[in-house]
Every structure is written in structure tokens, then in C-alpha cells.
Image (cartoon, rainbow, N blue to C red):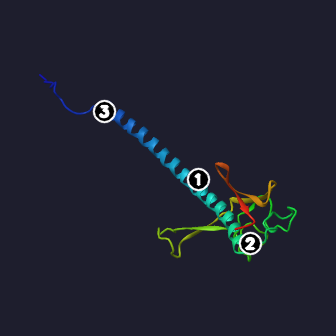
Amino acid sequence: MTRTQKNEKGFTLIETMIAMVLLIVGLTGLLGLFGFGIKHQQIEREDFIAKEKARECFESIYGARNAGQLTWDQVDNIGGGGSGVFVTGFNPLLGPGPDGILGTADDSVAETYTLPGPDGVFGTNDDVIVTLSNFTRALVIAPVFTNPTLKQITVTVRVTSTTGQRDYIVAGFISEYH
């Protein structure tokens, strides 16, 4: 005669399999979230760089005007009617040339930024230098017709990446007087 006990404790094989499937589904969703986060981290880095490069160009023009490096007629695009020194259209994001002013015809060296290398320490020999080859900059300087001593400056930095094209614009005014 066999006896069966009704108070057996534990999980059945079916319950264990269902729990494993639910765990796998949850972990797969979590893995997808990590991929999403890494992708957006790269986008945020590009966005930050684009915004800062637009502001940097804008400030370069103010600094050159304040230092007397540029005359009022030179604060214009090349071919803008005066003796402008700033290039027109979207151009590669280059560092300042010998004149020290961003956005002029003598800009030559590609802009870069540095990331820590495999050791995770910034400032060591294994740091990674990244060229900003997917960035372009356009600088438009337009007169304000109601005031001949005022010009509008618009700096647009365009980022082209796997997610498409994004533009970051800084606009403001510059006066002949500082």
C-alpha cells in the first residue's frame, strides 16, 4: 500500500518554467533599456558639444571686437558688402587660425575633444582623441536696418549622426560700441 502525503511543499516543474520565462522577459526588456541609454548618452554628448561650439564662436566675435582685433566693417560675412572676414555657408568645424577668431577664412585645424582611454583616467597616454568631423558651422551676420550700429549674429552648428541631422542656433546682436 502506498501512501500519498497531501501537504507536500515546493514548486512544480511548470511553476519553475513559468518563473524562468517571466525572468527572461524582464531581463530582455532591461537589456533593451541599456541600449537605449547608451544611444542617448552619445546624442547628449553631441548636443552639448554643438551648443558649446555655437556659443564659443559667438563669444569669439565679441572678444575680437572688444580687443580691437576687428573693425566694425570686418564684422560681416565675406561678400556681405563690406570688408567682412567671416565665411558663409556650412563649413567643417575648424579651430581658429592665426587670427584667433572662429569662423574666418584662415581657420585650419579640425576641432577635437579628448576622452579617457581604456584605463579610465583622463590625461594619460592612452586617451582617445575624437575629431568633430560630423559637425559643421554656419555664421550669418546681418545688418539691423533700423540701426546702422547694430548687427545680428546667428551661429548654427549642425550635427549629422545616425539619428539624423540636428541644428543648434545661437543668435544675438553686436553693437559697434562696446
CA distance separating discs 2 and 1:
26 Å
The residue that mark 1 highlights is 43
Residue drawn at x 77%, y 72% is 106
Q: Residues within 10 Å of mark 1 (few under 14, many from 20)?
A: some
**Quadrant in the picture for the C terminus:** bottom right
Which is more N-terminal, label 1 or label 3? 3
- Tell me if mark 2 has few (under 14), some (14-19) or many (20+) residues whose alpha carbon lies within 10 angstroms of its own: some
- Residue 153, image x and y in percent? 73, 59
Q: Nearer the viewer, residue 62 or 162?
A: 62
Q: Amino acid at mark 1?
A: Ile
Left or right, residue 46 beside residue 93: left
Q: Is residue 62 above or below residue 20?
A: below
Circle 3 is placed at which residue position?
Answer: 13
Q: Helix, strand or loop at disc 3? A: helix
Q: Which quarter of the rendering shows the N terminus?
A: top left
Image coords of residue 27 (percent x, y): 42, 43
Q: Nearer the viewer, residue 75 or 5?
A: 75
Return the residue nearer the eye: 146 or 102.
146
Per the model, the C-alpha gap separating discs 3 and 2 is 69 Å
* Residue underneath mark 2: 108
- Is residue 82 positioned above or below 164 on the image? below
- Kindly report which numbered mark, 3 or 2, lies closer to the viewer in this rendering: 2
